[in-house]
Amino acid sequence: MVILIVINLQHITQKLSNPTTTLLLSGFVLILGSVLPDVDHPFSKIRKSFRYVLFIFVFLSFIFLLNQGILETKNSNGTNSDSNSINSALFALFRLLISVIGSFIIVFLIDSLIPGHRGIIHGFSFAFIFGILSFSLSIFISLVLLGMNIQSIESKISTFDHLMVGFCGFCGYISHIISDILGFK
């Protein structure tokens, strides 16, 4: 049995156009998918981690957006209107305060939208959705992090690689649901 698994794994890795990246990402979404269904339990470690990661993401998004000139205005001569160092420091503190308060509010709102334990998130439909999101994450990483454009993506990373990542995400999620059905803790 183990020999068949090794032979199949070798056969699969030979079909991958970028085996290292694909296998690392597949392993990541497999593990994430196996613990993600417990995000609906109010005291689970994954839910606490989800809150922290979401807060950091939202906070950094606020900082990025607020420093991109959304709140800053320019004078006619091209200098910042808050060129005075005191005004600049107060304005930076104000942006930081908005980022922290806004992050707390968004995390609270998203956290309150998560349904009760073993509700809709603990279903096969969400396993399918997580598989699609894993597939999309693989394409996103190919486009953004590897610096590829949409025309050259097929020449560097095959669709099979993305499908494998999506399938691993689906399998990880399903493994958690099946273990809950069978009563494993």
Image (cartoon, helix red, strand yellow):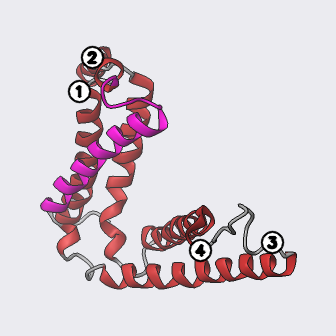
- The amino acid type, in three-letter code, at marker 2 is Lys
When asked about the image quadrant of residue 5, the answer is top left
The foreground one among 128 and 64 is 64
Q: Which residue is mark 2?
A: 15
Tag 1–tag 2 contact (CB < 8 Å): yes
Residue 166 versus residue 69 in the image, above or below: above
Q: Which residue is mark 1?
A: 160
Residue 93 versus residue 162 in the image, above or below: below
Mark 4 or 1, nearer chain start = 4
Mark-to-mark CA distance, 2 and 4: 50 Å
The N terminus is located in which quarter?
Answer: top left
Q: Which residues are magenta?
A: 124-152
Mark 2 or 3, nearer chain start = 2
State the SS at label 4.
loop
Mark 1 or 3, nearer chain start = 3
Q: Which residue is mark 3?
A: 83
- Residue 53 in the image: state x and y as whole percent: 51, 65
For the point 34% across and 22% down, the residue is: 152
Tag 1–tag 3 contact (CB < 8 Å): no
Mark-to-mark CA distance, 2 and 3: 58 Å
Q: Residues within 10 Å of mark 4 (few under 14, many from 20)?
A: few
